[in-house]
Amino acid sequence: MRQSFEYHPVIGYRFIPGLKARIPHEGGGYLIRVNDCGFRCERNFITEKKPGIRRVLLFGDSFTAGDGVSNKYRYGDLLEKKIPNLEVYNFGLPGAGTDQQYLAYKEYATGIKHDLLLIAVQVENIRRVAGHYRYWLNERGEQVCYAKPYYELVDGTLILRNVPPRKEPIHEADLSKEERKFIAVGRFPKLKKMVKLVTRVGLKDLAQKAIRYQLAPEYNSPDNPAWQIMRAILEEWINNNRQRVLLMPLPPYQYVEEMGDPSHYQARFREVASATGCMLHDPLPDLLKYSLEERRGFRFQKDVHLTPQGHAALATSLTPILEKLLDDLEQGVHK
Amino acid sequence: MSTTILGISAFYHDSAAAIIRDGEIIAAAQEERFSRKKHDPRFPHHAINYCLEEAFIESSELDAVVFYDNPLFTWDRVLKNCMMAGPRSFDQFKKASRSVLGIKMWVKDYIIRSIGSLGKLDKLLFTEHHMSHAASAFYPSPFQKAAIITLDGVGEWATTTIGLGTDNRIELFQEINYPHSLGLLYSAFTYYCGFKVNSGEYKLMGLAPYGEPIYYDAIRENLIDIKEDGSYNLNTEYFGYLDSSVMTNDKFNNLFGGSPRKPESYITRREMDMAASIQKTLEEVILRMALHTKKETGADNLVMAGGVALNCVANGKVLKKGIFDDFWIQPAASDAGGAVGAALLVSHAYFDIPRKINPNGRDTQRGSYLGPAYKPSEVVAFLGRKGYPYERIANPQQLAEKIAQVIADGKIVGYFAGRMEFGPRALGARSILGDPRRRETQSVMNLKIKFRESFRPFAPSVLAEDVSEFFEMESESPYMLLVAPVRKERCLPMNLRKFQEGDDNMSAVITQSRSDIPAVTHVDYSARVQTVHPSDKPDYYHVIKKFKDLTGYGIIVNTSFNVRGEPIVCSPQDAYRCFMRTEMDLLVLEDCLLWKEEQPAFEDTEDWRKTYELD
């Protein structure tokens, strides 16, 4: 399989510019096309906007970049088909936290003329925001730890650390005990083996439902340090952008399939929207209108990423909101 | 709307995939290149993935998917063979049943599991094995009309076919069926001489010039009855492949004076003479068959495919005889090419897409550069991630000049540029290059780079316009499928006295200069030639041209970029690994140059001598 990413001295990594590849996958494989800037977008990014064209800058992680599906099946691309004269610049970056997405915005998007900034925060991104290191699989399928850029909140100010991130992999043993706590890992790293076993015997979904699994307890309290950083990043990002911002928390499948309680994260995102005055769209209520069987079809059998059906459902939820917002903007309702 | 067909060959040896759009070959690759298992017979997941990537198409958008042979007919052959051979063939029956019933019958399921769809047709098409070979030979050829010969081990039943191709149509009108097989006969000798079947046939051919055909009469009298028209019957009493898992039996062994040579043991005069004898027999059959085919079809041109068509010595004899005005051989002549043939056949025969013949008189195989390419940005990303030092030369002329200078200085260069070759030969996209003027190039390349038997010759890549300056040859040979004599005035006398007196040691012959291009001159003063045309591969052409500017010789040594037993490298990662494991001096990865002495110590995570089964 081709190498898809290259080192980036600020963000940590990006797609290799100009890459065209097909990634084998349980869904049958998918095609990716990367633009000149190193983002999985059908369009090259152009600063100026053509008259009559409405442009949305879309940020997110692998759910937005479209892991598991070809470019044309992603919700960002579907929006272009559903809404006339719309072009979506997709800056989705798999494996990235909201911090890295913000850095990508600062590196590549600030000068690009647009009508709307759409920040799609996959709810679990909060764990990446709190992390200083991340594991990746190398070409031999082995886990390798790399440093990532991250923010610290010092006296209410965001301070960027680890830039440029170290190029070479880091041995966990070389990290101090304190630093090891900042390796972004799954929810229960110590129970990894048990989780694997439960997954293998096909009881993962049942177990999560039974214990009312809480995917991201970082959202439980507004005072949680990880949330504090996440909130500060979002607020800075939203406040610094001159155009309207639509904030969209993307619910992991545990919420879509009603295995967990979403109320905490929903409350936190409402607080950000309220504090910044940005628009908030929570697609979860729309997704819950589908039957459970249909919702199960929104993710792959093993991979938790969205299937084409999942992307379509998300695009259907977003379309009327986005369309109205863009129409209102055109008519000067929002300034 | 375009019509896109995916062709698949698998489950015998050399699995492959190919994709054809509106009759044009878009991509083709062997699974071994991705899986890193030589002649990988498994379902070609990776090759299919690559083909869809190159065509940039969803599997659901394919117009059809076709498999290159018919498992039902193969099962028919297995059953009847075992019924004929009786109880002693039970083990072979079990093995063949597992292959046909356990794998081949489920091709459709493999495809759906792999790519999720059978395309718009929503059913899997099948062709017949030799029809796939015939299609792979005829459709990409430059001929509107051509006689067709296919020769291999075995397909479903057929082992040899003769036919005629005209425009979109292919008609096969004569065939020889299993167990009579020229391919299996040659493989039996390959096995007996201690080489690996379906892989070592090439070595046997290379060994033949060292020997004398003293077993020719024994072969003709006992093993094969060759008719005037080139058709033949084997005496199956001498072969093991009907009822056992080995190619020969005691009767065969007794005829040639003992047990087969043990693999990797010393090669003796007997093996050299056996090689020479079977090569002479094979050439006789092919020449007679070519004459007969000419008579039957009246065609001016001949096309060939099937594993036996890779015997470039025999091909050279056919060319020299002048039976046909011109001829073309599918460069991926073995089963891998079946994927291309099957997909082309469906394009032209099922979807009735008109065949496009190249107006410039060249073929439509696109130099057989049908595999994946890696952009310079991908190479730089790889080198950057690993921190390997490199020098980048973006100007193609300067790059070619630099590489040529390095070769002229006697260094060995790993050359990785553009799309990978489809077929067994490296043609300057994944090649190791050297100076043909130096006597030591052959032994350095064999022993320190390729780690293979020292008798094996290397092939030259020569500027197309200079071919007759070096060889007794006027025609092009872009796929390294023709052997031609080195021009007499370039040849040097050899002292063969000791060898002719019975000394088996080939090194006394190998180390002697045989011409002013000793590294590519075989012991019989022949060479397996690749002519390089600027339109086929400009970067490679320019390297040779610059070498000529420096040395006066428009010719370099070209051998495949791999070590013994390893599939030819595919990706920059493969190339770097192979470079670091051998004594190559310079690695060219697109426009990046990597010097061996500047590289960090290589931490090999595996013992490649164990990873790659010796071929």
Image (spheres, rainbow, N blue to C red):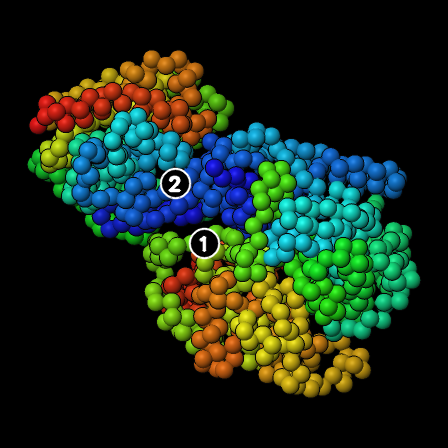
Task: Report the Cα–Cα distance between label 2 and label 1.
Answer: 16 Å
Residue at 87 percent across and 51 percent down: it is B236
Note whether A42 is above or below B241 in the view shown. Answer: above
Where is residue A273, by image quadrant? top left
- The residue that disc 1 covers is B373
Residue at 37 percent across and 17 percent down: it is A257
- Going by the numbered disc 1, the residue's amino acid type is Ala
Where does residue A7 sit, x and y in percent of width and height? 30, 50
**Does residue B119 show up?**
yes
Q: For this view, does B264 lie left or right of residue A112?
A: right
Where does residue A28 sit, x and y in percent of width and height? 49, 34
Q: For this view, does B318 lie left or right of residue A70?
A: right
Q: Chain for mark 1?
A: B
Q: For this view, does B312 lie left or right of residue A250?
A: right
Mark 2: secondary structure: strand
Where does residue B324 sit, x and y in percent of width and height? 72, 63
Q: Are marks 2 and 1 in contact (CB under 8 Å)?
A: no
**Does residue B136 show up?**
no
A208 or B445, which lies in front? B445
- The residue that disc 2 covers is A32
Report whether mark 2 lies on the same chain as mark 1. Answer: no
Mark 1: secondary structure: loop
Where does residue B257 sit, x and y in percent of width and height? 87, 65
- The numbered disc on residue B339 is none
Where is residue B586, by image quadrant? bottom left
- Going by the numbered disc 2, the residue's amino acid type is Ile
